Amino acid sequence: MRDVVADGGVDAGPSSSRGEAVAESKQPRRRLRIAMISDFFFPNVGGVEGHIHMASNELLKRGHKVIVVTHAYPPNRTGVRWLPGGLKVYYVPYAVLARQDTLPNFFSLLPLLRQIFIRERIELVHAHQALSSMAHEGILHARTMGIRAVFTDHSLFGFADAASIMTNKLLKFVLSDIEHVICVSHTGKENTVLRAALDPSKVSVIPNAIVAADFTPDTAAPQPGKITIVVLSRLMYRKGIDLLIAAIPRLCAQHTDIHFLIGGDGTKRVDLEQMREKYLLHDRVDLVGGIRPSDARAHLVRGHLYLNTSLTEAFGTGIIEAASAGLFVVSTRVGGVPEVLPSHLIELAEPDEDDVVRAVNRALTFFRSGAHSPQAAHDAVAKFYSWLDVAERVERVYFQAMQETMPDAWDRLCAYRACGPLAGLVFVILAAVEMMFFHILEWLWPAVEIDVVPDWSQEERPAL
């Protein structure tokens, strides 16, 4: 068992021993008012969206007040909505630039966010994802208002290309004035610490999770003489679909009893179809198209092995979903993937065509030996990962953040100035303009004139 999951999880702060966790659990917990903010949320579907939704619901169950702030989704997902479970969502009407990310606007979001934070009496803002403009701006505006801030980074980024350089510089600016940062894997923590020049003691590792009960193995007898390898992924370059295209013909030539069941859609689907045509594999490679999240388990349990060929992965939620559904996993050794499962549940490969073929061959040998137990795999994943555990660890980070001393305006400007000779000066100017704009808003519309909404207990929330 790898160290990451051997003790039931990973660290949740610089002083997060199990003994301290037990001691904290015996103390009365204060109810917090929390705003989750990101460009990525339902009805869009993805890992970040699911993480925010599930963690928020668990925090609600633990007695905290949680709202979500995201951008509007056409045609009519705008305004204030209540989701099942009592989660309140503000869909802010801002235009999307690309891939559900809003156009960076720096100051124009401040009046609206100020209204929301004051109305809901928010004490802590939790922003998600480095590619979310709204998350970065939410942290900046929250700090100007004197609100604590926590950030979760869900992805890995490089250091050389222009887009990564700009993203990393912006991340360094925003995270230079924040209480705490959370990453979903130790590899992600190393990546974020380097990109944002952070003190590692301010960064915790809290993994993603799944609802294991939604991914139970299929008890039906497997089809004799046939081994199905399942793929469930967006069909795009960074998911390693080129590796998959290269490996499938070689594996089919070596094993007459294997079939591929590929779920997902994307730009690489045409390449997969061309490969299937070229090697006449229509009866052995089934492309089923996009899969709804609610149908993921039904797709997974049709197979025996799960193949992931990603070129980059901060965590890999799909891997633990597959293992929970009883499949033996084969995955490229990238990002945080080696931390996710113990070695008896996964076979790792380098992101190379030959090594992917080798790893699948080893997995097939292991599976044919009868050593893999789908139910044992499910039980292990259910023990390792739960959203309740995630919520408890995030809650500890929140309480630690609430004890930090808030910096004054001069300290904030000094922190921004230290971000670089030129960039630091730009950041100081942006922060100074932000502060002046905030004081103008305070003069035009004092906080005491803004209506405050009541805090509902878990029992009082509407049953939706």
Image (spheres, rainbow, N blue to C red):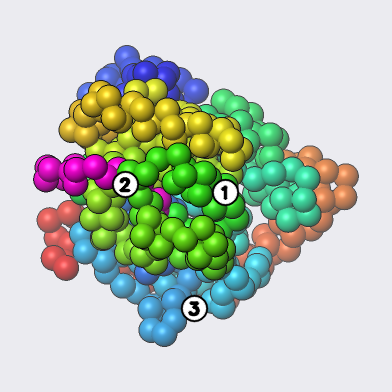
Q: Residue 463: x, y in percent? A: 13, 65
Q: Residue 312: x, y in percent? A: 57, 43
**What's the residue at 21%, 64% (across, down)?**
84
Residue 317 appears left or right of 169: left
Q: Which quadrant of the view contains residue 18?
A: top left
- The disc label shown at residue 246, or none: 1
Closer to the observer: label 3 or label 1? 1
Secondary structure mostly seen in the magenta stretch? loop
* Residue at the top extreme, as displayed: 19
Q: How far is the residue under mark 2 from the one under mark 1?
A: 18 Å
Badge 1 marks a residue whose secondary structure is helix
The numbered mark, 2 or 1, whose residue comes first in the sequence reads 2
Closer to the observer: label 3 or label 2? 2
* Residue at the right extreme, as displayed: 421
* Front residue of 418 and 190: 190
Task: Identify the magenta region.
Answer: 217-232
442 lies above or below 144: below
Callout 1 amino acid: Ala
Q: Which quadrant of the view contains residue 6?
A: top left
Badge 3 marks a residue whose secondary structure is loop
Task: Look at the numbered discs 3 and 1 and tell me whether their residues touch, using CB distance below 8 Å.
Answer: no
- The disc label shown at residue 228, or none: 2
Q: How far is the residue under mark 3 from the one under mark 1?
A: 44 Å
Which residue in the structure is indicated by mark 3?
93
199 lies above or below 279: above
Badge 2 marks a residue whose secondary structure is strand
Callout 3 amino acid: Pro
Q: Residue 40: x, y in percent? A: 47, 62
Q: Quadrant of the C terminus?
A: bottom left
